[in-house]
């Protein structure tokens, strides 16, 4: 992958200093910090401020369009040229500091779902509600874009979780979307965590969707008190609220949209858990940041390590989870 251009920020750079003052990027408000602007590749990848005062990277390359928020290192849009959007984003989503964006790819870390023994802790951890730093932005010879975002342990994370870490999120935007989450233990003791790339896929009608790749796999059913069950020999179909945590599976999944015929491939590595979720009617009505009818138009197929697949790494060690998302056949991860 030839490098056309790399811009790096970190350490004593302005953005680093800014953040060191505890000012979240989403509070910067009116302007994009100068050295974020300096990273822009005009016409290809530029930092911009949205209507809510939040900063995002807008990618408009010959390969694909995408949008990535610094808030939660959250990809909210991915659309290869000539193809319908791949990710679902709720029209009711909030874009508020401290709150997760509803849709796209939230990053769950360092726990998945509720935190055992800590009812007060935020669901799915704190990574999706914090501001991440931009470490680098580059364009390769094929005009695909690579951005690396970083979240480092700080006072706020220590208040929730007593560990030292650096998490890097690498996002590659080309004909397909590659996302890699690398967790590094920068502390002096072992740390155990859960993680998920909680992807919301856009579909025409979830009742016409098939998910392949989980046939005959075991799962815990969150709609039934986490009871242990087995998926049948047929592809997974949706006929009601679905919330299944498939453990010990490294399988590639395929989402087939029965209305459009589109097939999205979800290929992964470093992950042994896949979660499949649709809130259906009642839960959709209860969710404030989700439209009552939106349950029809999304399905989550999440690349994770949770429950028995939680990850433990020692001091100085790293662990990576990676997903390749593509409409149609995709390269191996
Ligand atoms: O991944 C599925 C799940 O854990 C569901 O149980 C559901 O709660 C969903 O995540 C959304 O969680 P959130 O905290 O974003 O409302």
Image (cartoon, rainbow, N blue to C red):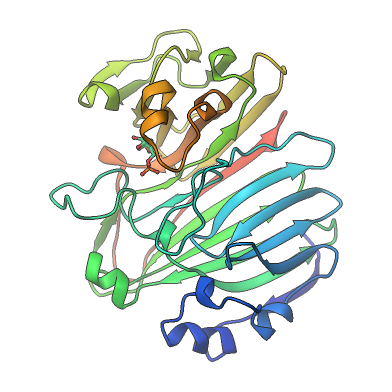
Image: 146 above or below 104: below
Q: Residue at x 62, y 42 (%)?
A: 324
Q: Is residue 110 visible?
A: yes
Furthest residue to the top?
233
Viewport quadrant of the N terminus: bottom right
Relative to residue 254, is residue 327 drawn left or right?
Answer: right
Q: Position of residue 96 (x, y in %)?
A: 47, 60
User: Camera-side residue: 331 or 15?
Assistant: 15
User: Quarter of the image holding residue 230?
Assistant: top left
Image: 250 above or below 149: above
Q: Residue at x 76, y 64 (%)?
A: 45
Q: Position of residue 332 (x, y in %)?
A: 64, 38
Image: 48 above or below 33: above
Q: Is residue 173 visible?
A: no
User: Quarter of the image holding residue 34?
Assistant: bottom right
User: Camera-side residue: 291 or 108?
Assistant: 291
Q: Residue at x 60, y 19 (%)?
A: 205
Relative to residue 85, is residue 41 drawn left or right?
Answer: right
User: Camera-side residue: 291 or 212?
Assistant: 291
Image: 81 above or below 207: below
**Total tally of numbered discs in the picture:** 0
Q: Residue at x 79, y 73 (%)?
A: 5
Q: Position of residue 212 (x, y in %)?
A: 54, 19
- Quarter of image, ligand 1: top left
Viewport quadrant of the C terminus: top right
Relative to residue 322, is residue 239 drawn left or right?
Answer: left
């Amino acid at each position: 992958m030839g490098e056309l251009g790399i811009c790096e920020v970190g350490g004593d750079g302005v953005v680093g200093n800014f953040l060191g003052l505890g000012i979240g990027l989403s509070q910067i408000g009116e302007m994009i910090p100068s050295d974020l602007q300096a990273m822009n590749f005009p016409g290809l990848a530029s930092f911009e401020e949205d209507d809510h005062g939040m900063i995002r990277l807008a990618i408009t390359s010959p390969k694909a369009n995408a949008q990535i928020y610094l808030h939660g290192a959250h990809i909210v849009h991915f659309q290869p040229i000539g193809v319908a959007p791949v990710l679902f984003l709720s029209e009711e989503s909030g874009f508020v500091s401290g709150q997760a964006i509803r849709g796209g790819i939230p990053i769950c870390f360092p726990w998945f779902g509720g935190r055992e023994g800590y009812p007060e802790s935020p669901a799915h951890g704190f990574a999706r509600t914090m501001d991440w730093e931009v470490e680098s932005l580059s364009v390769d010879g094929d005009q695909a874009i690579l951005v690396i975002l970083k979240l480092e342990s700080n006072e706020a994370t220590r208040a929730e979780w007593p560990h030292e870490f650096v998490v890097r999120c690498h996002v590659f935007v080309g004909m397909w979307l590659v996302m890699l989450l690398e967790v590094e233990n920068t502390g002096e003791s072992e740390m155990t965590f859960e993680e998920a790339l909680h992807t919301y896929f856009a579909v025409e009608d979830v009742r016409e969707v098939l998910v392949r790749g989980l046939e005959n796999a075991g799962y815990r059913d969150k709609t039934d008190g986490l009871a242990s069950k087995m998926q049948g020999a047929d592809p997974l179909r949706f006929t009601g609220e679905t919330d299944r945590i498939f453990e010990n599976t490294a399988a590639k999944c395929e989402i087939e949209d029965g209305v459009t015929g589109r097939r999205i491939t979800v290929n992964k590595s470093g992950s042994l858990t896949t979660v499949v979720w649709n809130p259906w009617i009642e839960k959709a009505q209860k969710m404030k940041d989700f439209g009552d009818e939106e349950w029809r138009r999304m399905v989550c197929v999440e690349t994770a390590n949770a429950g028995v697949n939680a990850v433990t790494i020692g001091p100085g060690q790293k662990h990576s989870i990676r997903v390749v998302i593509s409409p149609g056949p995709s390269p191996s991860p």
